[in-house]
Amino acid sequence: MSGDAGGEQLLEGLVEHASLKAFTSFGVEASAQYLIQVYELAQLRQAIEFARDNRLPCLVLGEGSNVLFVNDFPGIVLVMRLQGIVREGELLRVAAGENWHRLVEWSLSQELFGLENLALIPGTAGGAPIQNIGAYGVELMRFVERVRVYDTQRAEERCFSAEECDFGYRDSVFKRAPRGRFVVLELELRLSDKDCPELGYGPLAAMFEGKPATARQVFDAVCALRRSKLPDPRLLGNAGSFFKNPIVSLAKVQSLRERWPELPSYPTEDAELLKVPAAWLLETAGWKGAVRGQAAVHEAHALVLVNLGAATGEELFLLAQEMSSSVLQRFGIALQPEVQIL
Ligand code: FAD
Ligand code: EPU
């Protein structure tokens, strides 16, 4: 499809009034004023120039596995498809559009270890540093050497060292920046040639009963655990955990335990702060399996909102608001969304 914007000839591959439904794992209907799938750097530069010339906001999407569109997007959506992996010893340079899980599988096949706990996380390599993906006791930040980005504000490429990325729990400098400022082009990871997997996470440790395991065995165990808990977005629209696990003071946990002695908690780096599973708070508040029209809370996991088939973004958003209000009222804890609400 092509047309005219601001008197300019539109770019090749640019689609006007594009449906975003197939571009997110929630599968809700929304439209973008423009959408382009970016396979080459030159195409990306042209698309960014086009946005600047026409004063359009930009939004980058990888595989859309951590976004919820509540409104149409009044600008240009750049779907990141850049491909390529370069290996130099234990260092990998991965183009932003590479599928994350395939990268994990490929690294194991290369006898490069470390990513096994992060198996089966949906999305792209470029999406991974945005919220510093994590699972089963490991976060991406452990492996990041550098992240190469295009800074749309300065109109230049930049490299962020791991320190400059300022990673935190489901957080980074990229997530905090104004939307569309940094386009991740390439992720540089340092893996290890030593097969020495991380087995500290409770449910994983329980599976191996304290016995040593190989990275391949951990990869298989993580895949099995994830498949038993989380719905497959190809079958049931979802974005994984909708909220972050809240980090609260030790004093708060102790006071809640007077009423709910079974309240689980996990240590953080700060002895005065504990992480509490949002899923437990939500299940205790009665949300597991709740249904509001076509939006629902997954029957097997209270932290996962699902699209029963024809949910709107607004329906899911209103359900999420209702859930967080009830947790605030009952436990005095404010849940923060993990999913990017647009
Ligand atoms: P998108 O959803 O497309 O985008 C997410 C955000 O990143 C948006 O703000 C977008 O603008 C930005 N973005 C994406 N690519 C780029 C880029 N190249 N440059 C700049 N900005 C970009 N996450 C975890 O951490 N741990 C889990 O265990 C986990 N489990 C999940 C399970 C399921 C079933 C699902 C559906 C999701 C899960 N997630 C999990 C969330 C999701 O997989 C991750 O956040 C993933 O990294 C998102 O990647 P994406 O390419 O789909 O990003
Ligand atoms: N629980 C309940 N009810 C439920 C589900 C869980 O009470 O319906 C309680 C249980 O006590 C359980 C605890 O919550 O032990 C933790 O549950 P789970 O092991 O499923 O992990 P989670 O805290 O819900 C986090 C991440 C996941 C990640 C897993 C494994 C966040 C927000 N979520 O989930 O990441 O895969 O741990 O490490 O930190 C994501 O970010 O999208 C995501 C799926």
Image (cartoon, rainbow, N blue to C red):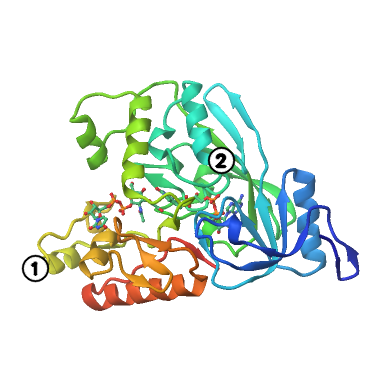
Residue 142 appears anywhere in the view: yes
Q: Is residue 136 visible?
A: no
Residue sitting at 76 percent across and 60 percent down?
15
* Residue that appears at 51% across and 43% down: 162
Q: Quadrant of the C terminus?
A: bottom right
Q: Secondary structure at mark 2?
A: loop
Q: Is residue 129 left or right of residue 252?
A: right
Q: Nearer the viewer, residue 8 or 313?
A: 313
Depth order, front residue of 35/125: 35
Q: Which residue is mark 1?
A: 258
- Give the Cα distance between marks 2 and 1: 46 Å
Query: Which badge, 2 or 1, comes first in the chain's sequence?
Result: 2
Q: Residues within 10 Å of mark 1 (few under 14, many from 20)?
A: few
Point out residue 41 in the picture as x, y percentages from the top left corner. Answer: 75, 44
The residue lying at 43 percent from left, 49 percent from top is 232
Do the residues bearing badges 2 and 1 touch, measured as CB atoms within 8 Å?
no
Relative horizontal placement of residue 18, taking residue 244 as reference (left or right): right
Left or right of 284? Residue 169 is right
* Residue 174 sits above or below residue 125 on the image: below
Residue at which label 2 appears: 99
Can you say whether 58 is above or below 114 in the image? Answer: below
Q: Residue at x 56, y 40 (%)?
A: 99
Does any atom of ligand 1 lie closer than 8 Å to the CB of label 2? no
Residue 124 image point, x, y percent: 56, 45
Along the line of sight, which residue is nearer the eye, 130 or 166? 130
Q: Which is more foreground, mark 2 or mark 1? A: 2
At label 2, the amino acid type is: Asn
* Res 20 → quadrant: bottom right
